Amino acid sequence: MARGYYFPSVNLMEQGAIGLIPSEIAKFNVKKALVVTDKVLMEIGTAKKVLDILDTAGCEYVVYSDVKPNPTVKNVNDGYDVLKANGCDYVISIGGGSAQDAAKGIAILATNPGKLSDYEGVNLTKNKALPIVAINTTAGTASEATINYVITDESRNVKMVIVDSNCIASVAVNDPDLTVSMPAALTAATGMDALTHAIEGYITAGASDFTDLFNLEAIRVISANLKKAYDNGSDINARDKMSYGQFVTGMGFSNGGLGIVHSMAHQLGGFYDLPHGVCNAILLPYIMEYNTEKTGDKLKNVAEAMGVDTTGMSKSEFDKACIEAVKSLSKSVNIPDDFKGMGVKVEDIEVLAGLAMKDACTPGNPKEPNLDDIKDLYKKVF
């Protein structure tokens, strides 16, 4: 079946990439940017590295820096108000998935009527967003490269998943120099988020030969470099490889879809404001096991990409070896293996499972789940 594949039209990569940003902006007919970021990146100087380049190039901008780790509808609306009040005609996002997702929502509201919740779902806008220059500072979400964004609707305690080709960035930037300030725990969470994207994107029902190329490459690169980046944040080669790996899987899963790891993790973020990457990492092995009857030889390929010798293994053996490799990597970067101490409540499972069933990622799961399946999977992680 014919299908479209969507990518940012310009992708700036490797050390020094941020220095190329002004020349790309000059190609647009724009006057003033809304810079979307968060307070932490402003305080530790990461955002300043970009702002200094904009200042030197004479680029006009105003900063909105109130984005939360799980960005909210209020963040998007407040940012949009700043954009309108200052006559901004394009958006620059500096951050991980939080800033990138908030920026997409703002840029979409600037060109489409109504409120953000009107666009929850798949391709519901009519107009392309304002130009976005998406500058990534983590190695996890790949939101700078994808057609997806996730915003928490505080009124419903729900993470809205919005899949929209109109939100894709005009320019995506991955400069590993911006990731060296990430603390080890964030390196672990974002790195396991990227691995989840790659594995789930590889086994999803919407995968194709084209997306498989990206996701297998990402699995290989991320599994070989996450521990190195975690152990030594100044290892610029490992940081560069992680930036590359998370970006590559972004091009894969953005064009193929995900599954119920994300459906279930989204609810945990919406309900309890938990870190998305950690939720993904905890859930991933359980759901890989659940999906094995529908994954064929794919987990064999995943295991081999992670360095496992599968010679002579039966399907049950290479499925198990693959899941163990994922658990081992997650443990090596100190990700917990269950929800204990995270504030997740058993009595909320009924609601969480119901919301997960409605999540936009659920149809992509290789094994079609029912409500009881989702409830049982949540219970297994306690």
Image (spheres, rainbow, N blue to C red):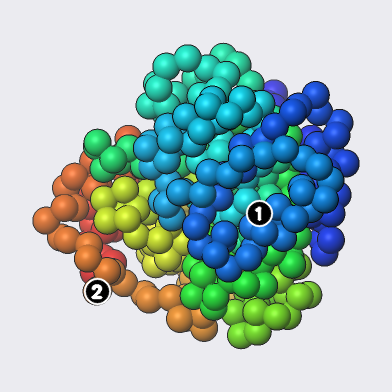
Q: How many marks?
A: 2
Query: Which residue is painted at 16% across and 47% down in the image?
Result: 350
Who is closer to the viewer here, 344 or 39? 39
Could you classify mark 1 by the number of other residues whose Cα lies within 10 Å: few (under 14), some (14-19), or many (20 or more)?
A: many
**In the picture, which quadrant includes the C terminus?**
bottom left
Who is closer to the viewer here, 42 or 144? 42
Amino acid type, callout 1: Asn
x%, y% of residue 268? 31, 54
Residue 375 vs residue 310: left or right?
left
Q: Are marks 1 and 2 in contact (CB under 8 Å)?
A: no
As drawn, 167 above or below 264: above
Disc nearest the viewer among 1 and 2? 1
Mark 1 secondary-structure assignment: strand
Which residue is denoted by mark 1 in the rendering? 136
Cα gap from disc 1 to disc 2, whole angstroms: 30 Å
Query: Which residue is painted at 51% across and 54% down in the image?
Result: 38
Amino acid type, callout 2: Gly
Q: Where, by quadrant of the figure, is residue 77 drawn? A: top left
Q: Residue extending furthest left? A: 347
Query: Which residue is painted at 65% across and 79% down in the image?
Result: 233
Which residue is denoted by mark 2 in the rendering? 341
Give whichever of discs 1 and 2 has the lower sequence position.
1
